[in-house]
Amino acid sequence: DLSSSRLDAFDGLVKPLAEFWHRFSRRGLSPTALESYGRCPFQFFAEHVLRLQRLERPEEITSPSPADFGELGHRILKDFYQELLNRGYFAEPRPALDLETILAGAVERACADYEATNPVGYPLAWITLREDLTQVLRQIVTQDLEELSTSGYVPAALEIDVAAHLPPAWPKPLSGLTIRGRMDRVDCHRGGNRLRVIDYKFKSGAGPTKQDRDLTCAALRGERLQPVFYSLLGKQLGMRADLRLVDPDIAADFYFVAPKWDEGPLVRTSFGAEGLSGRVGEEIKDTVAFIANGIRKGRFFIQPGDYCRHCGVSEICRKNHPPSLWRAENDPVTRPHRELREKDPKKL
């Protein structure tokens, strides 16, 4: 009922989970986990604290999902560029390689591995998906290799896990905590002390969202924290023995693989090192600290939004229960979380 306007434990306002926070923070804060809390604290609670997963029914799967499509694409791109690195493609003089054959081999291996462990649905649909994926990736690598040949960047590492400590100047409770991330690709500039961290994003929609277009605003609102973390983790990566860079300039780029976008199929959006400087940078740090504090204090209320359509725990969410929704919308505890979505770098 509406006996109280305040949230309680049944609404997700639980006491601080000391053991969970210790384990979560010691392992290292990941940007995707923090983004989950930024979207909806209850979603984070269900997926990361309770570790709930939706039960899939193989008999109902008619074809690979968009997420599967993206995973296949990631695997193929990694294998493709790894083969180029292994065969000295980016060295001088450049060897003559049959790029089409190398790409076809990467597609074949990735799809064969997927077929061995996953239902693929109707054979004709699976064949069509493979052909479509190959065609898209053929365009992607052509554009990408052209850019690499003119920008001076060279792939240096693929799908690498990196961890680092946040600087002492970051607000509590972040100061000194470990952060971690998995980078799809890291490019090193031939002529300077520069690194570029690349994250592939496979998109099936007709056009980009605002978060896709403006990574700084998305970081400010806690919607896209990967570029923020990658900018910091890139500094740590630059100290590797094979790179030996000293405080390199870092750019974190999203490479959107988006065949239906007007600007597609490859669209690049960058988050430069300057994104963490000045007033905007301080506000981004405050956003990350606010999210971490919410997790540490055990605040896991519902926060409905457009993302509810794709939520993996929607079956147990109480957003359709009017009293629960009323309390979540009216308790003062939830207001600062909603206000994250109103942050605008142009108004700072």
Image (tube, rainbow, N blue to C red):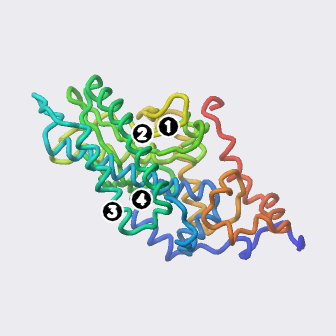
Where residue 247 appears, x then y in whole percent? 28, 38
Q: Which amino acid does label 2 sit on?
A: Val
User: Distance from label 1 to label 3 (Cα)?
Assistant: 24 Å
Question: Which residue appears at 33% of the width and 31% of the height?
Answer: 142
Q: Helix, strand or loop at disc 1?
A: loop
Q: Is residue 275 above or below residue 173?
A: above
User: Distance from label 3 to label 2 (Cα)?
Assistant: 20 Å
Q: Name the residue under label 4.
A: 177
- Is 71 placed left or right of 282 in the picture? left
Mark 1: give few (<14), some (14-19) or many (20+) Cα within 10 Å. Answer: many
* Mark positioned earlier in the residue sequence (1 or 4): 4
Can the viewer see residue 173? no
Image quadrant in which you'd find residue 272 = top left
- Is 25 placed left or right of 182 in the picture? right
Question: Which residue appears at 70% of the width and 58% of the height?
Answer: 303
Q: Is residue 57 above or below residue 203?
A: below
Where residue 20 appears, x then y in whole percent? 50, 74
Q: Looking at the image, do the residues carrying marks 1 and 2 touch, with CB atoms under 8 Å apart?
A: yes
Q: Name the residue under label 1.
A: 259
Q: What residue type is labelled 1?
A: Pro
Q: Name the residue under label 2.
A: 136
User: Distance from label 1 to label 4 (Cα)?
Assistant: 39 Å
Where residue 324 appears, x then y in whole percent? 80, 68
Q: Which amino acid does label 3 sit on?
A: Asp
Q: Quadrant where the N terminus lies?
A: bottom right
